[in-house]
Amino acid sequence: MIDLQTVNANVFRVPFFRFLNFEVQSLDSLHAVAEMTFETRHIGNPVMDHYHGGIIASFMEATAAIAVHPDFTEVPAKPINLTVDYLRPGVKGPLYARANVTRKGRRIASVSVNSWQTDQEKTIAEGLYHFLLV
Amino acid sequence: MADISKEKMEQIAQMWNARGKGLITHMALEIEEVSSDGVRVRMPFNPDFCVDKDQTLLHGGILTALLDSVFGLANFVAIEKVSTMATLDLRVDYLRAARSRADVIVNAHCFRQTRHIAFNAGSIWFDGHEEAEIARGTASFALTRGDVSMFEAMTKGKAS
């Protein structure tokens, strides 16, 4: 299994992942957990300083892609589509995502992702992501 | 549905451009067309949104963020007296690899509104390649209605 330091070095090489500014915290063959730092450029609602929904979806997609293919060299795993449910606003502060690979076949992977802030029980958003492995 | 007044369109453009911070500002979105039938917005190429070393392949997430933003704009325009709006859910299909340094064009509209919910659809292509859509999305939004619209509340603050 690839070590965290190498994964985070890979993450840092991706321009959009630097834009998101997150770090992978733990990883095994079917899961990845990552933490994203709040940035002004992530704001969707400038009055309330909430995260933009698209940033939350992007961060969950990035975490899912790493769970599917942590040792990518050129580009992260190829996304096919996604659905996201937004359950609570994402407020100023760190955001966490946990991706679980529910099925990884030869061609397609399905990944479910959860995100939270201070309380892991209080989900901010959850999503289902498909990736093409060929 | 009637086209909205030029004045309202200018106010909307001003409001978007005057946000001053956040992702929409960072995306440098330019409104190309606005009517209650739908909106068309341009996102200039930005290397920060790419996944590859050569910076020619956009990350899917930025396309999702673009759809979410422009659905919000379409709802602003199409729906009267919305005081708050929150994305309930979002589905995006990535139809082909988003490899280009061209500007991105997004078209979005609200195809149904009820008292509490708005339903949206939109698609994305690279400027000049409308026949080759790169992504398509649908979303639903939870609305709360009030006497002071979110649009009025935000533009009034910028009046002076």
Image (cartoon, rainbow, N blue to C red):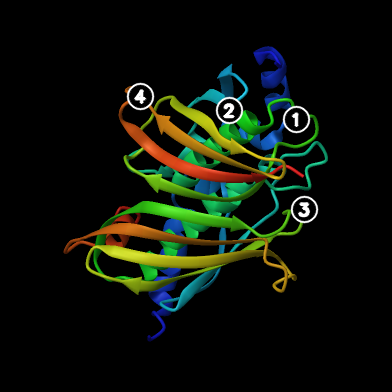
Q: Which mark is residue B99?
A: 3
**Which quadrant of the figure contains the N terminus of chain B?**
bottom left
Q: Looking at numbered disc 4 in the image, what kind of residue is underneath it?
A: Gln
Q: Looking at numbered disc 1 in the image, what kind of residue is underneath it?
A: Phe
Q: Which residue is labeled 4 in the image?
A: A120
Which badge, 1 or 4, comes first in the chain's sequence?
Answer: 1
Which residue corresponds to the image point at 58% horizontal and 38% vertical from the top-left?
A103
Cα–Cα span, label 2 and label 3? 23 Å
Q: Position of residue B79 (x, y in %)?
A: 31, 70
Q: Looking at numbered disc 3 in the image, what kind of residue is underneath it?
A: Arg
Q: Which mark is residue A59?
A: none
Q: Which residue is labeled 2 in the image?
A: A21
Q: Nearer the viewer, mark 4 or mark 2?
A: 4
User: Crowding near pointer 3: few (<14 within 10 Å), some, many (20+)?
Assistant: some
Quadrant of the rendered image containing residue B149: bottom left
Q: Position of residue A77 (x, y in %)?
A: 70, 39
Q: Secondary structure at mark 2?
A: loop
Which residue corresponds to the image point at 41% horizontal and 77% vertical from the top-left?
B36
Do badges 2 and 1 share one subunit? yes
Quadrant of the rendered image containing residue A48: top left
